[in-house]
Image (cartoon, rainbow, N blue to C red):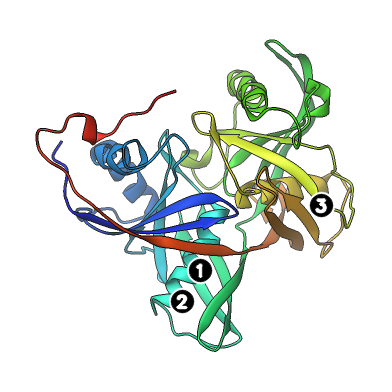
Amino acid sequence: MKITAPIKTVEMHTGGEPLRIITEGYPQIPGDSILEKRRYVRDNLDHLRHFLMFEPRGHFDMYGALLVPPSDPEADLAVLFLHNEGYSTMCGHAIIALGRYAVDQKMVDVYEPITTVKIECPCGLVIASVEVSEGKSGKVSFLSVPAFAFATNQEINVEGHGTVQFNIGYGGAFYALASAEQLNLDVQRSPTRDLVDAADAISQAVRKAVKLSHPDSDDLAFLYGTILTDGGDHYSSDPTANICVFADRQVDRSPTGSGVTARIAVQYTKGLIKLEQVRVFESVTGSLFNAEAVKELTCGPHQAVQVRVSGKSHYLGESIFSYEEDDKIGKGFLLK
């Protein structure tokens, strides 16, 4: 496949989790819906994901956002999410960054103190609210697509760990949720590699044992990863810590926007929290997201909630990536 160059990007991070926003250089992407665009990019342009996410331009845990024309008439912009394995359906840390980016680039009419940015994602329309003061963007919150508990209080045998209790929540993507304590691990103190190994083992076991489904599309019905928690699922004003391991053992440096959405949905379904009880979620970097269930909904057969997640993203710079035809290594590689 031919590599189009140069490709221009804006570099941001949310809680330490990178976001490479691709602004120029991709070919036109056909498709009447965002899911069709996602399939086209996956099937025809995956070499460009390797080019931008993998080394030497990226790294094993790089994350990207490709802006595409929206198919939803309500949307201000649309986005496809890129990572080390493929293309996600939702990404909260990216929404927080894109909210600021859309305001700063005047992609929407800007109002103070709050500007609304409607972002079409593969999972549906996500509404971001961006704080604006004296023309400068700041903190961002977003309202999730309907989030629900797919399965609660389940047990599974996990290689190397025995019986593990878990839940499955949907927050724009499906996650297995399990406390690290039952694995003799601590999400804030154990070596990251041990946490990754355990979370990945749970993901593999759940993928083999549980058939997921989503009422909107089969494209959404896959387990994105596992979130190990500190077990703090009952309501408390104190932060609850977690680590999200998704895609191909990729570690989220932020608390994970879609992940905390899934955690809130499961906590609400199990009666552990009430509407509008704000919870604070802490990541492996110490960054914080606030999240709360704000409204009851339904999603097909599932009782669901809409979740508001809040955080802050920061700019890192801009990049222009080029390619020389004789550089085979420069097409992208990963060391695992």
Q: CA distance from mark 1 to mark 2?
A: 6 Å
The residue singled out by tag 1 in the image is: 99
The residue under the point 39% across, 80% down is: 106
Label 3 element class: loop
Amino acid type at mark 3: Pro
In the picture, the quarter occupied by the C terminus is top left
Q: x, y (%) of residue 139?
A: 61, 71
The residue under the point 54% across, 89% down is: 134
The residue singled out by tag 2 in the image is: 103
Q: CA distance from mark 1 to mark 3?
A: 24 Å
Q: x, y (%) of residue 98?
A: 47, 64
Circle number at residue 239:
3
Earlier in the chain: of badge 3 and badge 2, it is 2
Residue 275 seen from this side: yes
| Quarter of the image where one finds residue 50 | top left
Report crowding for label 1: few under 14, some 14 to 19, many 20 or more residues within 10 A (C-alpha): many
